[in-house]
Image: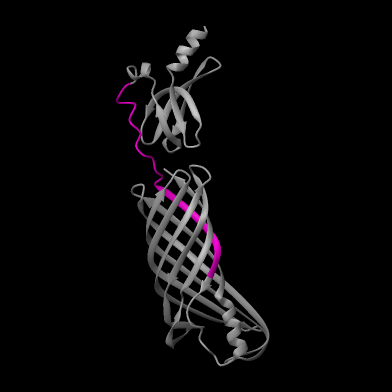
């Protein structure tokens, strides 16, 4: 009986997963999508299927090579995830020159808007292991307030709050390089930039909006928590400017373009599918 068990074990195929686990079994079928295999548990034959992206390597026992149907067992193609979704949160710094109003306290309030909260999401589709297309959406948000402030074209305010939000939306070209546990990626995108600012002295509110066109690009690195999930860091730059704005239904033009550019760094969580 010991000899029979030993011979049976030596004739088993072997699957090696990306987590370095081994599965002694009999491989029935393997292609670029999945692996179908059979194993014996408590004397009962059991069939299972494993997604191909979980398989790092496999071995077919010599005894089984003659039995296996060559049309069913294919040499494994390097697996890669075609779809990727990520969400990021972090810090951004508004770039460009601030417009001076001549009021030092009021200009200091606007200068406090340079430090921003950033967020972003992207959906990617890869044609191969290294290149693909994407839709990038990311934005920055900041707010600041002050007491007893003189507001131009309004007057003295007991309290004044200002908030800014800039959102970039655009199609992108995405690229990546995958190692065993790490993924390095980059993107470049073109698209519209939506700008909104609210100035709220006391109970009054003035809203300024515009839509411009911009460029965004970035790089990042991730650590694979599993074949599907990863966590990492991403940094990037969004460039744009505008000189025509809508303020409470009125159109105004500035003498010099106002920068809508920002530099951001954030942590991201991503999910991959075949």
Question: Which residue is at the front of the view, 130 or 247?
Answer: 130
Residue 268 on image: x %, y %: 52, 56
Q: Is residue 141 left or right of residue 61?
A: right
Examine the rendering and report whether any part of residue 245 can be seen.
yes
Is 26 magenta? The answer is: no
Q: Is residue 31 left or right of residue 246?
A: left
Residue at 45% in and 12% down: 7
Outermost residue toward the top in this view: 1
Examine the rendering and report whether any part of residue 163 can be seen.
no
Residue at 49% in and 76% down: 95
Residue at 41% in and 67% down: 216
Residue at 50% in and 12% down: 5
Question: Which residue is at the front of the view, 177 or 102?
Answer: 177
In the rendered structure, which segment of residues is drawn in magenta?
Answer: 69-92
Question: Which residue is at the front of the view, 267 or 59?
Answer: 59
Residue 59 on image: x %, y %: 40, 26
**Where, quadrant-wise, is the C terminus in this rendering?**
top left
Residue 202 on image: x %, y %: 66, 84
Image: 99 above or below 89: below
Residue 65 on image: x %, y %: 34, 20
């Amino acid at each position: 009986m010991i000899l029979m068990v030993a011979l049976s074990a030596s004739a088993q195929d072997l699957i090696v997963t990306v987590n370095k686990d081994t599965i002694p079994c009999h491989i029935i079928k393997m292609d670029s999508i999945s692996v179908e295999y059979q194993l014996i548990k408590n004397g009962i034959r059991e069939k299972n299927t494993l997604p191909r992206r979980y398989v790092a390597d496999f071995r077919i026992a010599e005894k089984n090579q003659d039995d296996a149907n060559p049309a069913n067992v294919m040499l494994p193609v390097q697996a890669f995830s075609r779809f990727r979704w990520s969400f990021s949160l972090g810090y951004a710094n508004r770039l460009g020159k601030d417009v001076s109003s001549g009021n030092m306290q009021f200009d200091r309030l606007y200068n406090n808007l340079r430090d921003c909260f950033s967020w972003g999401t992207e959906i990617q589709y890869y044609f191969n292991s290294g290149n693909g297309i994407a839709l990038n959406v990311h934005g920055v948000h900041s707010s600041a307030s002050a007491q007893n402030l003189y507001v131009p074209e309004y007057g003295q305010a007991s309290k004044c709050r200002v908030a800014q939000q800039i959102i970039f939306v655009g199609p992108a070209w995405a690229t990546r390089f995958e190692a065993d546990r790490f993924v390095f990626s980059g993107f470049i995108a073109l698209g519209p930039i939506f700008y909104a600012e609210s100035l709220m002295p006391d109970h009054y509110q003035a809203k300024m909006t515009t839509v411009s066109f911009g460029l965004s690009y970035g790089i990042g690195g991730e650590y694979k928590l599993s074949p599907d999930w990863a966590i990492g860091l991403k940094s990037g730059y969004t460039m744009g400017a505008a000189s025509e704005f809508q303020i409470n239904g009125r159109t105004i033009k500035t003498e010099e373009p106002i920068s809508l550019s920002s530099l951001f760094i954030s942590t991201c969580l991503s999910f991959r599918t075949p």
